Image (spheres, rainbow, N blue to C red):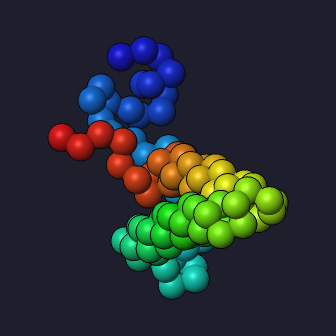
């Protein structure tokens, strides 16, 4: 064990939560929200965004067939899909960073 770990009282192999999670848990509990509920809300948000991505993709296909490529509605729908996909990716990365999504299933 190195000197810094000894000063902090960290034992080898001891799982320590990142320090940023402690204020987040305190803030969530201050509003009456526990971590399990936050995980459920995150799952619902991810599912809704995924459905919106599929709907945007379907509308782009509809506009492509219906307008025969003469309108910009297809491009707008595909741009919306890309934006939603990027937002979903960032949401998942934030969920992993804040510990709402586990890193490795063992």
Residue nearer the viewer, 28 or 10 = 28
Give percent across and percent down for residue 97: 52, 46
Q: Is residue 15 above or below residue 42?
A: above
Q: Is residue 13 above or below residue 84?
A: above
Residue drawn at x 48%, y 33% is 8
Image x and y of residue 21, in percent: 52, 54
Q: Spot the residue most to the left.
A: 106
Percent position of residue 88, x then y: 57, 56
Residue lying furthest front in this view?
68
Residue at the image position 51 percent from the left and 84 percent from the top: 32
94 and 32: which is toward the camera = 94
Residue at the spot x=49%, y=79% of the render? 33
Task: Please tell me which residue lies in front, 98 or 84.
Answer: 84
The reply to whether residue 23 is in sight is no
Quadrant of the frame with the C terminus: top left
**Place of residue 61 in the rendered image (x, y in percent of width and height, measured from the top left):** 58, 62
Q: On the picture, is 28 further left or further right than 15?
A: right
């Amino acid at each position: 064990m190195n000197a810094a770990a000894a000063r902090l009282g960290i034992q080898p192999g001891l799982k320590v939560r990142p320090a940023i999670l402690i204020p987040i848990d305190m803030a969530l509990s201050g509003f009456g929200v526990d971590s399990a509920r936050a995980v459920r809300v995150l799952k619902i948000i991810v599912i809704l965004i995924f459905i919106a991505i599929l709907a945007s993709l379907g509308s782009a296909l509809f506009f492509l067939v219906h307008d025969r490529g003469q309108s910009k509605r297809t491009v707008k729908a595909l741009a919306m899909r890309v934006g939603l996909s990027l937002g979903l990716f960032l949401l998942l990365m934030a969920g992993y960073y804040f510990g709402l999504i586990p890193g490795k299933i063992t």
